């Protein structure tokens, strides 16, 4: 099943429950309501429909007739629009506001002329009477400008019935939707014949895309066309199917939908499909608790359940549920489908649990279940989201959900950051450990492994011991330690710096021994234990280390350093001097 076909099926299920607008309607932000009497005269001031307080008031969503695509053309909406079209007023320069308002009035006279519905006749009376200067004369609020407005008869306001909701208005809109003489074709999504959509509705809410929306399917250049077809005829999708998949995707992309998570530059949505709607809802709730929403970590309950699932302790997993996950990213005026995964819910959960287990490290980070965004920023310069490498988020998430190897750009990015800023923290080491396990089939240790003989791991441990010797000899107030000066070179080209560090350590050990012989003996024992594990007869300091060994270097350094921090023998320099 394709991603668009899955979205159409999701729309049909949500439409049956009344969660999404019917065909021809869409959810749009509406700020104000203008009430009319039977003659079309406004009754009182416009009603503010925005939610919130003070300067944080935002327009809520309302199901209204679907707007047309606006680029440079003037295209009024049916029975609603922004104030530039509906009232002829705007807060900006508005060089063509007069033409927009005139088009709004003319189109509605043509669309609604001859109607005997009381509400539609009142609206025609309003546009015949209205003049833009009346906005100031009536004292209507300036903050209303450039918001979308709807209309209603004053007597219907209490019932919440707007003009576009009236049966006569819906019939008129249905005729308008079907009046376009579009060619009939076989829909690639549904397999049914119907009018082919020339332009598909826009997708809104994708991070980084145009605020007015972008398209997944569009053809705007000759190079994209085939056999002389224009626009949507190149990939025939019916108007009903185009509306369905766009409506479902826009619903999932809403900030409070509970179906989206931002992973780097990939706006990711997920939903579950099952014969049992309760099982699907339970799977979606569980997925949200595990993945985390809005760049946050998963909930403690979700993390605990994930660990229980990984160990086999959790068996109450919804059965017969298929999970769909789509990652979208901006690509000029279009949207790029970074990944689409559909799989049995238990299978995806198993893969995500395995990923979670691979990230486990001791000592661990403060957050037991860091979000994908928190992990990704560790690969970016200055830990800024905008510096995360393009495609990295989508490739990593796809690898997790499909069980494929992680992208190697993840490894190279982390090694570059470690060599640049020398911050060997729990999150970075956890990611490196997971890459070693997944991509290189290695048994990377979770905590300090005294038996590991890998040269990269041993050199990382040795480097950490040298740093501890320096701190014990010179005190913790150093402006630059061995790590600050030599980490990048030591992890990539050990032979360049390790002989120098080793000779410096001899002097530092002598200084430590003057104050604390036991401490010196402990350091010498640690160095000897590490050196004994290295291959005999070979230079312990290789000319260079590949990326995999550099990852092990960081892992060994992290384990040895934190083992020393928590060891009882470790004491402040001032106490050792006494």
Image (cartoon, rainbow, N blue to C red):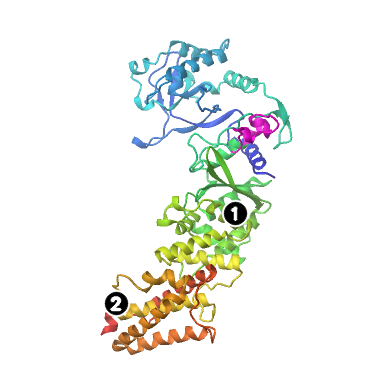
- The dot on residue 398 is 1
Element on which disc 2 rests: loop
Q: Is residue 202 left or right of residue 491?
A: right
Can residue 130 be seen?
yes
Across and down, in percent, residue 106 comes to 51, 14
Crowd around label 2: few <14 · some 14–19 · many ≥20 (10 Å): some
Image mark count: 2
Query: Where, by quadrant of the figure, is residue 422 drawn?
Result: bottom left
Percent from the top left, x then y, of residue 401? 61, 55
- Asked if the stretch drawn in magenta spans residue 238, the answer is yes
Residue 124 coordinates in the image, percent (x, y)? 50, 13
Q: Quadrant of residue 434?
A: bottom right
Q: Which residue is mark 2?
A: 475
Residue 352 belongs to magenta span: no
In terms of sequence position, does the residue under pointer 1 or pointer 2 come before the other?
A: 1
Magenta extent:
216-244
Image quadrant occupied by the N terminus: top right
């Amino acid at each position: 099943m394709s991603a668009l076909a899955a979205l159409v099926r999701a729309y049909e299920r949500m439409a049956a429950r009344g969660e999404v607008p019917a065909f021809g309607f869409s959810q749009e932000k509406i700020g104000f309501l203008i009430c009319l009497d039977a003659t079309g005269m406004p009754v009182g001031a416009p009603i503010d429909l925005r939610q919130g307080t003070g300067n944080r008031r935002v327009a809520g969503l309302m199901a209204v007739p679907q707007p047309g695509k606006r680029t440079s053309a003037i295209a009024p909406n049916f029975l609603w629009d922004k104030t530039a079209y509906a009232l002829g007023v705007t807060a900006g320069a508005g060089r063509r506001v007069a033409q927009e308002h005139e088009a709004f009035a003319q189109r509605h006279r043509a669309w609604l002329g001859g109607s005997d519905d009381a509400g539609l006749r009142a609206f025609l009376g309003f546009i015949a009477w209205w003049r833009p200067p009346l906005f100031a004369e009536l004292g209507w609020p300036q903050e209303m400008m450039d918001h979308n407005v709807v209309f209603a008869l004053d007597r219907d306001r209490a019932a919440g019935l707007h003009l576009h909701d009236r049966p006569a208005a819906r019939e008129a809109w249905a005729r308008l939707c079907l009046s376009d003489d579009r060619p009939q074709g076989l829909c690639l999504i549904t397999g049914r014949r119907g009018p082919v959509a020339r332009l598909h509705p826009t997708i809104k809410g994708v991070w980084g895309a145009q605020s007015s929306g972008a398209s997944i399917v569009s053809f705007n250049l000759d190079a994209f066309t085939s056999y002389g077809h224009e626009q949507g005829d190149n990939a025939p999708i019916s108007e009903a199917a185009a509306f369905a998949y766009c409506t479902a995707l826009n619903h999932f992309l809403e900030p409070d939908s509970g179906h989206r998570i931002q992973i780097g530059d990939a706006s990711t949505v997920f939903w579950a499909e099952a014969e049992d709607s309760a099982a699907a809802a339970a799977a979606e709730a569980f997925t949200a608790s595990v993945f985390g929403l809005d760049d946050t970590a998963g909930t403690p309950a979700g993390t605990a359940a994930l660990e229980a699932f990984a160990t086999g302790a959790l068996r109450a997993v919804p059965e017969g549920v298929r999970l769909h996950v789509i990652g979208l990213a901006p690509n000029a005026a279009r949207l790029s489908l970074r990944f689409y995964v559909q799989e049995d819910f238990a299978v995806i959960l198993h893969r995500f649990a395995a990923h979670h287990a691979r990230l486990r490290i001791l000592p661990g980070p403060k957050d037991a279940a860091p979000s994908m965004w928190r992990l990704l920023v560790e690969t970016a310069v200055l830990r800024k989201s905008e510096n995360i490498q393009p495609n990295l988020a989508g490739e990593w998430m796809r690898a997790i959900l499909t069980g494929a190897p992680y992208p190697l750009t993840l490894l190279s990015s982390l090694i570059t950051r470690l060599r640049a800023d020398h911050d060997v923290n729990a999150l970075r080491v956890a990611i490196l450990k997971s890459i070693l396990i997944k991509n290189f089939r290695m048994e990377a240790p979770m905590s300090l492994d005294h038996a590991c003989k890998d040269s990269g791991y041993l050199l990382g441990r040795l480097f950490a011991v040298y740093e501890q010797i320096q701190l014990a000899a010179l005190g913790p107030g150093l402006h630059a330690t061995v790590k600050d000066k030599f980490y990048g070179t030591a992890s990539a080209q050990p032979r360049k710096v390790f002989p120098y560090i080793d000779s410096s350590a001899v002097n530092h050990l002598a200084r430590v021994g003057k104050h604390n012989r036991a401490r010196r003996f402990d350091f010498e024992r640690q160095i000897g234990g590490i050196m004994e594990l290295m291959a005999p007869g070979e230079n312990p300091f290789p000319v260079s280390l590949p990326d995999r060994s550099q990852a092990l270097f960081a892992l060994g350094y992290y384990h040895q350093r934190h083992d020393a921090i928590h060891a009882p023998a470790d004491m402040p320099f001032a106490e050792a001097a006494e």
